Amino acid sequence: MPETIRETDVRLTSLAHGGGCGCKLAPSVLQQILGEMPLTAPFANLMVGTETGDDAAVYRLNDTQALVATTDFFMPVVDDPYEFGRIAATNALSDIYAMGGTPIMALAILGMPIARIGIEDIRAITAGGNAVCAAAGIPIAGGHSIDSLEPIYGLVALGLVHPDRLVRNSTARAGDRLILGKGLGVGVFSAAFKQGRLDAAGYTALIASTTQLNRIGTRLAANPAVHAMTDVTGFGLLGHTLEICRGSGLTARLGMDRVPLLPGAAALAQGGVRTGAAVRNWASYGGAVRLGSSVADWQKDLLCDPQTSGGLLIAVAADAADEVLALLHEHAYANAGLVGELVAGDPLVEVG
């Protein structure tokens, strides 16, 4: 049997063909796959299924409780095993918060090339996931592991929500304002990291953003002015905004100058750093996006940039937008910003 190789001898990111939410299938490919899924209409208690590409499935248990269930896992976006575990767990729990739910339990998903990664480093990955779940107040109560060609880690996350406080991505209203909870640039940062072009400040910003829990989603769901919500992950801001538009039958108008970016992301994008996933994203949904003449190619790349553990995208009534934005800032979502609005029209995104 070959000796195991310690993390000090091999970079985690070198063992994977992609990393973080950039590993997701392109939206067009996923749509083709889900198009063959059987209809879920016969299941009366299934409140949310695959129909609108929402963040999690939701099943009504009784008049006051619904189960929110999701799973998310991917390959490393950083080389530090503990931070990889933290990022993957934070990302998985985000789907629960995006539906307005409260996590109650998680199961671990672990696939490791055990001939190439030391046991101590695998323990560090799971310890990172445990730390995040502890911070969220839930246990990792079990899971499943396999010997795989690439390192994979994530969670099955389960939560509860009151059926009347469930927030979907398909229930926005004309006139709503769109608020983004975190700055864009995670995909660009991860690409720069692999290329050896990410400085210490950028790495710190990458870790801080990807390990910040979106727990504010539970509180936002209690506000009747919050009409729809999702989290921005692998499809980028444009892709997840388009999901809201298609589900709600509305047009989104985004202001490029309003979109918050992580510090240093613009300089890296202008310097040619981009991800393959951003290119695939644009190829998948670019036909439903109208870019103004002032939007540069590097800005388009950032709008399509896959976000690992990205921010919440919130559709809120216009007269409550300032209140919601202030609440985000109060709870340390420092980069949160008002990025646009929803109006009556065809399901597409306009960027000016």
Image: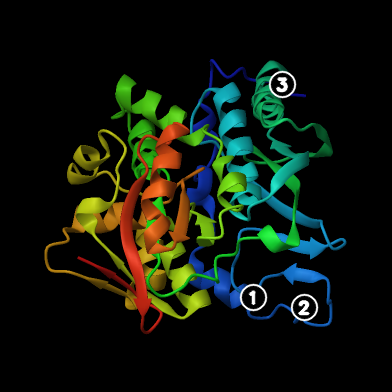
Discs 2, 1 touching: Cβ within 8 Å: yes
Q: Earlier in the sequence, mark 2 or mark 1?
A: 2
Please report the residue visible at 27 percent of the width from the left and 39 percent of the height from the top.
Answer: 265
Discs 3, 1 touching: Cβ within 8 Å: no
User: Label for residue 280?
Assistant: none
Residue wearing tag 3: 123
User: Distance from label 3 to label 1 (Cα)?
Assistant: 37 Å
The amino acid type, in three-letter code, at marker 1 is Glu
The amino acid type, in three-letter code, at marker 3 is Arg
Q: Nearer the viewer, residue 64 or 18?
A: 64
Q: Can you say which quadrant of the picture contains the C terminus?
A: bottom left
User: Distance from label 2 to label 1 (Cα)?
Assistant: 9 Å
Q: Quadrant of residue 118?
A: top right
Q: Quadrant of residue 81?
A: top right
Foreground label between 3 and 1: 1
Q: Work out which residue is located at the far front of the displayed protein and give it.
A: 319
Crowding around mark 2 (Cα neighbors within 10 Å: few <14, some 14 to 19, many 20+) is some
Please report the residue visible at 42 percent of the width from the left and 64 percent of the height from the top.
Answer: 241
The amino acid type, in three-letter code, at marker 2 is Thr
Q: Earlier in the sequence, mark 3 or mark 1?
A: 1
